[in-house]
Every structure is written in C-alpha cells, then in structure tokens.
Image: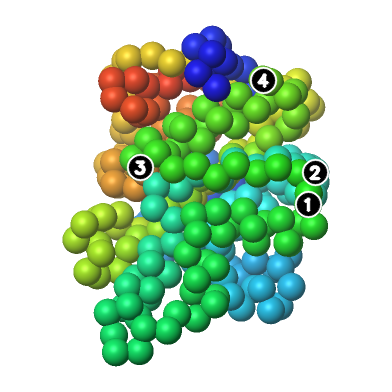
Amino acid sequence: MNDIAAKELVAYVTGIGVRGPGLVDWPQTEAVLCARQPYQRGETLLPAPETLPPTERRRTGRAVRLAFATGLEAARQSGADPAQLPVVFASSGGDGDNCHEICQTLASANRALSPTRFHNSVHNAPAGYWSIAAGTQVQSTTICAYDASFAAGLLEALTQVAVCGVTTALIAYDIDYPPPLRAARAVPAAFGLALILRANPQPNALALLRVRLDTGTASRLGHHELETLRATIPAAEGLVLLEAIAMRRATTVNIAYLEPQTLRVTVTPCA
C-alpha cells in the first residue's frame, strides 16, 4: 500500500452515509454542513440492522448497528449491491460496550463469558455481521490506527480502488466507552460515516477525490460544535471531507493522519 499511497489516488464518491449526535443521514448532514439547517446536537440514533436475520440482529451491539446504518445508506444511495461490494471497516476502538461488559465479568466472582460476548469482542465483528446480512463472499478489510483510523481507512479503500479497479466501500465508526474505560478513552459519542468509492465516473457521482500524502496542517471545521466532534471522535475526522463535498465547489482539505503526515484531498464536485 505504501508504494501506491506515495502517488495520487483517485476515486469518485457515489454514495455517503452518516450517523452521529444530531445527524441522522447524509441529506440532513449536508444541509447542516452547508448552513442551510441549524445543527442541534442530540443522541446518535442507531436502528437495528434490518438486513440481518432476527437471531443475529438480537446479538448486535451499537458498533455493529452504527456500521450498518451508515454502510447501507451509502450503498443504497450509490446503487451498489452489498453482496458484491468489498468493504474497508475502520474503527479506533471497536465495541467499547462489549469490552466493558467483558471486563466486568472477568472482575466478578462468576468469570464465565457468554459466547455472544466473546464473538462480538473481535475487532472485525461488524465485517462478519455484514457478510451474513449481504450473503457476500467478497473480501473485507478491518483496520485500526487509533486516532488516525479514518485516514488509514480512506487510504486503504482508495488503494483497493486504484489497484483492483473495483467499487469499494469505506465504513468508519466509533462509539463512546462507558465508565470507567471512558477515563482512558474519552470518545464522547457514537459517530459513523460511509463512502462508496468508484474508479470511473458515474452519472450519480457526487465528487471526484484526488488524494496524496502530505505534511500540511490538518483542516478544521468552522462550526464550533461540529469541530468539537471532529476533534474528539476519530471517525468524525471525516467531517472535514464531508463538508468539502457538501459545499459543492472545488477545494482542498488536509485530513489528520499519522503525524507529521496528513492526507491532502482535492475535492471536485461532479454535480
């Protein structure tokens, strides 16, 4: 990936999904980012994944529901078939709720873990549930780069588009940890976003992205509350890119990556 990342990576965005505090989908988020609608912070609404069979649906936690909510919205907007869609999942911390419950169990007199807790503890659990729901046998990738997880996921997804020429989804998500883990990892709320990236132009393309490694200063959002989300939730670093797409004008932003590196993203609107 490093050889490819040293060059400019190009892809068309044809679908976007968003869930966050007071952000319920891409159309509403776009309106907020363009200042057509005021931002009102609220709970992150996470519906049960309707594409999963009932048994698996009952076993899912917030991390899986967040990944599904954003991924399915983006896929539907793009017209992409989830069964044929390679996906890159990126999260800085996985399922904090499940981690908390496992720690509580191991610290108790009865240390027997439930099988559901155990299989939900792996970092690629959302990828497993996604493959069940979509009935897919195409590859998925699950990565973590701590606070740089969004940029790492975007770089990986773009690399797959460049190398394989296949439409690829990026699903980036983070949820808040309950106390006492929150003291060590103070992610304040759940936030997720998804992008469908294609190698070739499409009638429904929203924007063309040109991405390369840089060492510039990471871009910030002008809106105070949204900037707070960006600065405190690793997956919300993607709001910088979403704002650039929402404004529908040619612009360049720098997305925080592994210091001192950033991703320099030139955004050209397609519509």
Q: What colour scheme does the image use?
A: rainbow
Disc on the earlier residue, 2 or 3: 2
Residue 162, label in figure: 4
In the picture of the structure, the residue carrying the numbered disc 3 is 146
Position above or below: 232 against 117: above
Marks 1 and 3: CB-CB under 8 Å? no
The image shows residue 7 at horizontal and vertical percentages of 54, 10
Q: Is residue 116 left or right of residue 75?
A: left
In the picture of the structure, the residue carrying the numbered disc 2 is 84
Q: Check disc 2: other Cα within 10 Å, few if <14, some if 14-19, many if 20+.
A: some
Position above or below: 21 against 224: below
Q: Under tag 3, what secondary structure?
A: helix
Q: Is residue 101 left or right of residue 241?
A: left
Marks 4 and 1: CB-CB under 8 Å? no
Where is residue 111, by image quadrant?
Answer: bottom left
The image shows residue 215 at horizontal and vertical percentages of 33, 14
Q: Check disc 4: other Cα within 10 Å, few if <14, some if 14-19, many if 20+.
A: some
The residue lying furthest to the top in this view is 7
Marks 2 and 3: CB-CB under 8 Å? no
What's the CA distance linking mark 1 and mark 3?
28 Å
Disc on the earlier residue, 1 or 2: 2
Marks 1 and 2: CB-CB under 8 Å? yes
The residue positioned 42% from the left and 70% from the top of the image is 98
In the picture of the structure, the residue carrying the numbered disc 1 is 136
**What amino acid does circle 4 point to?**
Ala
Disc on the earlier residue, 4 or 3: 3
What's the CA distance linking mark 2 and mark 4?
17 Å
Position above or below: 60 against 130: below
